[in-house]
Image (cartoon, rainbow, N blue to C red):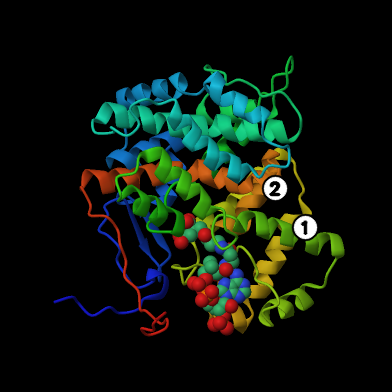
Amino acid sequence: ATKAITLDEGYRNTGACESNITFINPEKGILRHRGYPIEQIAEKLSFIETALLLFEGEVPSPDRLKRFSDLLTANEMLHEGVRQFFDGFPSTGHPMAILSAMINTVSCYQPDVMELEDEDTFDVSAAQLISKVRTVAAAAYKMSIGHPIMYPDPNLSYCANFLHMMFSIPKKVYEPDQDIVDALNLFFILHADHEQNCSTSTVRLVGSSQANLFASCAAGVCALWGPLHGGANVAIMNQLQELHSTKMDLGKFIEGVKQKEYRLFGFGHPVYKSFDPRAKILSAAADRVLAKLGVNDPLLELARRLEDVALNDDYFVSRNLYPNVDFYSGIILRAIGIPVNMFTVMFAIGRMPGWIAHWKEVRDRKSKIYRPRQIYTGPTERSLA
Ligand code: SDX
């Protein structure tokens, strides 16, 4: 007999799967990857060490890290056939559309992409995605400003290489100082994974049909794009810039939020009903990074005032609305020099290891295809006769 179907809109109270990768405690604002608190990971690991921790469950040995780093270097370039696609995109093409399209395009050049059965092909495909996502993102940026695409430099670290591809120009190599590289490393680590969020659940759902890793991650990019999810980091930056340029009274703005004329992006969370631990780390990092870079960003001051007003207003407190990962992340990206329309792409680069780790868990467990049911509310039977 079929079980009774109970409605759980958006699966908010449904455990879609069992997973060993990430643990969240919404009430206490706890986030752990493979048992390690995010605060310790942010302090002690690099982004690539965090990626391997997510994939394999352990902090990589120096040898394992070296082998994967060598794979990242070997796979950092785009095949010339892939690079030529950029000649066809308009400069106004949205970088998230380009990223999603190019992930599937890269797979066209990976002959055995569907047979990701053994660990070696998984490693190469994971390295391809984590390495090339930088090259594609930087190429989309260069194409949008009419600059030549910069080739990766195999002598640079993961983050330094990305910054080189973003900001170097022919005959003038961009050499980021370590504070900027460290800030980017922290940004990527804090975005690496977050349990069954909308985009990761999308990757798992697509992967459950045994679609390949590239197709599943391309779908994840599309889910992340929305302003209620990864797109919030662009929306909050636009909100702050609008508030700053119009010198709008904050009290009036908050009233508009309370009247539901618009949302305060970067606030609230589908799961956390207390402070997002990543927001705490990013808030502290924003002060530190801007001070080190000698950047005085009025939007940081504005964000602080907004946070203060909201956290003392019953509308937000009664709805458990606190700053989330997106509220301060944009301030750091601005200080690094990343343009706002690339912010969600930056989130995707950081989230790639989480998507890959969850796709691998679905595959390794030989999960059944995900197929939720529904409560039908349409017309009862009728006839065309
Ligand atoms: C991410 O899932 C993840 O883990 C996501 C993420 C990850 O790492 O993958 O953490 C990354 O996506 C962070 C969230 C980024 N999104 C934003 O910052 C967009 C702004 N936030 C909201 O849209 C909202 O808070 C959501 C979408 C994040 C969560 O919304 P919910 O849980 O569906 O809550 P809701 O829409 O049901 O709102 C509950 C109440 C409503 O008011 P009432 O109907 O009770 O009167 O709170 C209000 C909402 O109107 N509300 C907000 C608000 N968020 C919720 N009011 C103003 N501003 C907001 N930001």
When the figure is inspected, residue 381 is found, relative to residue 29, above or below; the finding is below
- Residue drawn at x 63%, y 65% is 265
Which quadrant of the figure shows ligand 1? bottom right
Total tally of numbered discs in the picture: 2
For the residue pair 239 and 49, the one nearer the viewer reads as 239
Query: What SS does tag 1 mark?
Result: helix
For the residue pair 88 and 65, the one nearer the viewer reads as 88
- Residue drawn at x 71%, y 23% is 148
**The residue under label 2 is which amino acid type?**
Val
Query: What SS does tag 2 mark?
Result: helix
Local packing at callout 2 (Cα closer than 10 Å; few below 14, some 14-19, many 20+) is some
Residue 23's x, y, as percent? 33, 58
- Residue drawn at x 60%, y 62% is 266
Asked if the residue at tag 2 contacts the one at tag 1, i.e. Cβ–Cβ closer than 8 Å, the answer is yes
When the figure is inspected, residue 80 is found, relative to residue 34, above or below; the finding is above
Q: Which residue is mark 1?
A: 241
**The residue under label 1 is which amino acid type?**
Gln
Residue 255's x, y, as percent? 73, 80
- Specify whether residue 170 is in view: yes
Residue 302's x, y, as percent? 74, 62
* Quadrant of the rendering where the N terminus is positioned: bottom left
Cβ of mark 2 under 8 Å from ligand 1: the answer is no
Compute the Cα span from label 1 to label 2. Answer: 11 Å
Q: Which residue is mark 2?
A: 340
- Residue drawn at x 28%, y 39% is 56
For the residue pair 81 and 255, the one nearer the viewer reads as 81
Local packing at callout 1 (Cα closer than 10 Å; few below 14, some 14-19, many 20+) is some
When the figure is inspected, residue 114 is found, relative to residue 193, above or below; the finding is above
When the figure is inspected, residue 15 is found, relative to residue 259, above or below; the finding is above
